[in-house]
Image (tube, rainbow, N blue to C red):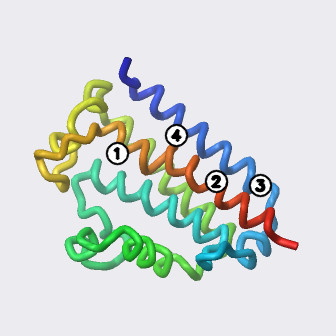
Amino acid sequence: MPLTKSELIHKIDAALQNLETYLAGLTEQQMMDLCDDQGWNVSDHITHLAAWEEMIVRLLEGKPRFQFLGVDSSELSRKPIDELNAVIRDHWKELSGTAAIEAYRRSHHNLIACLQTLADADLSQPAGKIFTQIPPDDERRVVDIIQDNADRHIAEHLPWIQAIVSASP
């Protein structure tokens, strides 16, 4: 049975709550000074999550996906994912851990507000029918694109964030 909008929002909110519960136990120093083997700190992971939720907001608003980064969205969308993530990381690298969490909360709030504009039936539609910036023949479901960049994305990054902190002496 497909997810309803209410169920989707609940899943996304629950994932954020899980992340925030973990982050609440961290100090600013832990969020900024501890890094993984790729050089990412906790703040980098948080802003990364914020950026991808913001990208969904832009898709739902019919705006260029990466305009919020202040770069040419059409050029950026053709980059390999690792290069795109590097641009996102560089864009927000100066934010403190606390500021990164606030940026994430704003993106999350924007996402939930945009999701309210969807009908339950929209979630099961092919992405190309709802998101004007995605080719019309893209058969991925709207709900999958949203979840891949929201609750599933948090579930992917939380263990990496926990590993950064647990690896510290």
Please tell me the numbered disc located at residue 145.
1
Circle 4 sits in a helix, a strand or a loop, which is it? helix
Circle 1 sits in a helix, a strand or a loop, which is it? helix
| Earlier residue among tags 3 and 1 | 3
How would you rate the neighbour count of disc 4 (Cα within 10 Å): few for under 14, some for 14-19, many for 20 or more?
many
CA distance separating discs 3 and 1: 28 Å
How would you rate the neighbour count of disc 1 (Cα within 10 Å): few for under 14, some for 14-19, many for 20 or more?
some
* Rendered location of residue 151, percent (x, y): 51, 43
Please tell me the numbered disc located at residue 158.
2
Residue flagged by tag 1: what amino acid is it? Ile
| Earlier residue among tags 2 and 3 | 3
Residue flagged by tag 2: what amino acid is it? Leu
Residue flagged by tag 4: what amino acid is it? Ile
CA distance separating discs 2 and 4: 14 Å
Q: Are marks 1 and 2 in contact (CB under 8 Å)?
A: no
* Closer mark to the observer between disc 2 and disc 4: 2
**Of all residues shown, which one is farthest toward the top?**
1
Circle 3 sits in a helix, a strand or a loop, which is it? loop
**Residue under label 3:** 24
Is 78 on the left or on the right of 27, as rendered? left
Q: Residue at x 59, y 76 (%)?
A: 38
Q: Is residue 146 above or below residue 165?
A: above
* Closer mark to the observer between disc 2 and disc 3: 2
CA distance separating discs 2 and 3: 13 Å
**Of all residues shown, which one is farthest toward the left?**
136
* Rendered location of residue 98, percent (x, y): 68, 67
Q: Residue at x 73, y 56 (%)?
A: 23
**Residue under label 4:** 12
CA distance separating discs 1 and 2: 19 Å
